[in-house]
């Protein structure tokens, strides 16, 4: 069965960077690929609720989905903040998941305000 799984992953052309995500359970790769999510960028473009909808019964928790997507965005180079990628959430790790995206937004917002102020 493991051989069949590997052959199916090759057939679906699943990006090795997506498969290599630390937070990505291997059993989700084929269902994602069957829905057209085969690259790291495809996955990083998702919102957590979209991922949950795509996976249906196989979906992780909202917090785990958010952490997986955040890790994909870090690996894909969406952030240039030098911060470590948060680990997949456990009961005490939920705050990390909810704080990281807000911090990124606030940093971008402050940069925009600075450039706007200097233009006037």
Image: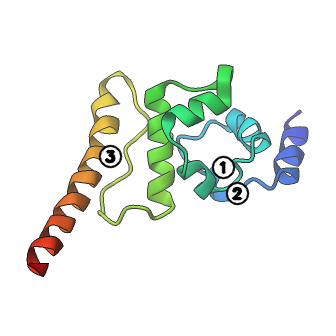
Mark 3 neighbour class, 10 Å CA radius: few under 14, some 14 to 19, many 20 or more: few
In this rendering, position of residue 102 left or right of residue 42:
left
Q: Are marks 2 and 1 in contact (CB under 8 Å)?
A: yes
Residue 32 placement (x, y as % from top left): 71, 40
Say if 109 sits above or below 6 in the image. Answer: below
Q: Residue at x 58, y 29 (%)?
A: 52
Q: Quadrant of the N terminus?
A: top right
Q: Secondary structure at mark 3?
A: helix
Q: Are marks 2 and 3 in contact (CB under 8 Å)?
A: no
In this rendering, position of residue 101 left or right of residue 51:
left
Say if 16 sits above or below 25 in the image. Answer: below
Mark 1 neighbour class, 10 Å CA radius: few under 14, some 14 to 19, many 20 or more: some
Rendered image: mark on residue 19: 1
9 or 57: nearer the viewer: 57
86 or 2: nearer the viewer: 86
Which residue is identified by label 3?
Answer: 101
Q: Disc 1 to disc 3, how far (Cα)? A: 23 Å
Q: Residue at x 77, y 39 (%)?
A: 30
Q: Residue at x 26, y 40 (%)?
A: 99
Rendered image: mark on residue 15: 2
Rendered image: mark on residue 81: none
Mark 2 neighbour class, 10 Å CA radius: few under 14, some 14 to 19, many 20 or more: some
Say if 65 sits above or below 83 in the image. Answer: above
Q: Nearer the viewer, mark 1 or mark 3?
A: 3
Residue 106 placement (x, y as % from top left): 21, 53
Q: Disc 2 to disc 3, how far (Cα)? A: 25 Å
Q: Secondary structure at mark 1?
A: helix
Residue 89 placement (x, y as % from top left): 40, 31
Q: Residue at x 66, y 33 (%)?
A: 54
């Amino acid at each position: 069965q493991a051989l069949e799984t590997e052959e199916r992953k090759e057939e679906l052309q699943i990006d090795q960077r997506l498969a290599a995500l630390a937070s990505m359970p291997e059993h989700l790769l084929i269902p994602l690929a069957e829905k057209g999510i085969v690259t790291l960028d495809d996955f990083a473009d998702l919102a957590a609720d979209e991922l949950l909808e795509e996976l249906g019964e196989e979906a992780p928790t909202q917090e785990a989905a958010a952490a997986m997507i955040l890790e994909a965005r870090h690996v894909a180079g969406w952030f240039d903040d030098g911060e470590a990628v948060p680990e997949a959430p456990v009961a005490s790790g939920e705050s990390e998941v909810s704080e990281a995206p807000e911090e990124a937004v606030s940093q971008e917002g402050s940069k925009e305000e600075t450039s706007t102020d200097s233009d006037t």
